[in-house]
Amino acid sequence: MENEEIMTGDMLVETIENQLSDGEPLVVKETLMRLVMTGTPREEAIQMMACALSIEVFDVMKNEGKFDLKRYSENLAALPEMPWEDDIQS
C-alpha cells in the first residue's frame, strides 16, 4: 500500500457531499433525509454516512475489487446503527 492514497475522513465527507450534489446514488440523499427527519443533526448524519462509505473504500483497496453499491446501500440503510463496527473491532 505504499503508493496508494488513503482516503481521510475529510475526503470521505467531501465524497458524501459530492454524492448529494450529484444526486448519485439516490440512496445517499434518501439516507440523509431519513436521518435528519428522525432528529440526527446534518453534520452527524454526514459523518455516519462517511463511515458507511469507508467500509466500501477499505474493501475496494484491500481486495482490489469493485465498489459494491448494494452493500453500501445496505450499510446506509442500517444507520444510525453501525453493525460493521463489531467486525472492525474484533
Image (tube, rainbow, N blue to C red):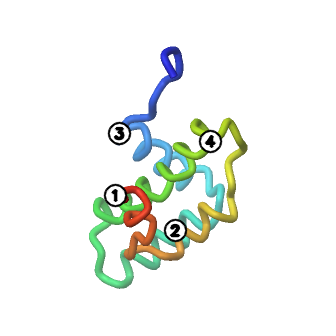
Amino acid type of the residue that numbered disc 2 sits on in the rendered structure: Leu
Q: Position of residue 19 (x, y in %)?
A: 56, 51
Local packing at callout 4 (Cα closer than 10 Å; few below 14, some 14-19, many 20+) is: some
Rounded to the nearest angstrom, the CA distance separating label 1 from label 4 is 19 Å
Residue 76 numbered tag: 2
Question: Circle 4 is placed at which residue position?
Answer: 60
Q: Residues within 10 Å of mark 3 (few under 14, many from 20)?
A: few
Say which mark, if any, is on residue 89: 1
Going from N to C along the chain, the mark reached first, 3 or 1, is 3
Q: Amino acid at mark 1?
A: Gln
The numbered disc on residue 54 is: none
Q: Amino acid at mark 3?
A: Asp
Name the one closer to the observer, 34 or 82.
Answer: 82
Q: CA distance from mark 4 to mark 2?
A: 17 Å
Sequence order check, earlier mark of 1 and 4 = 4
Which is nearer the N-term, disc 2 or disc 1?
2
Q: Amino acid at mark 4?
A: Val
Q: Secondary structure at mark 1?
A: helix
Q: Which residue is mark 3?
A: 10
On the picture, is 18 further left or further right than 47?
A: right
> Which one is closest to the eye, mark 4 or mark 2?
4
Cα–Cα gap, marks 2 and 3: 18 Å
Is label 3 or label 1 in front?
A: 1
Residue lying at the far front of the rendered structure: 90
Query: In this rendering, which labeled residue sits more in front, label 3 or label 4?
Result: 4
The spot of residue 88 in percent (x, y) is: 40, 56
| First in residue order: circle 2 vs circle 3 | 3
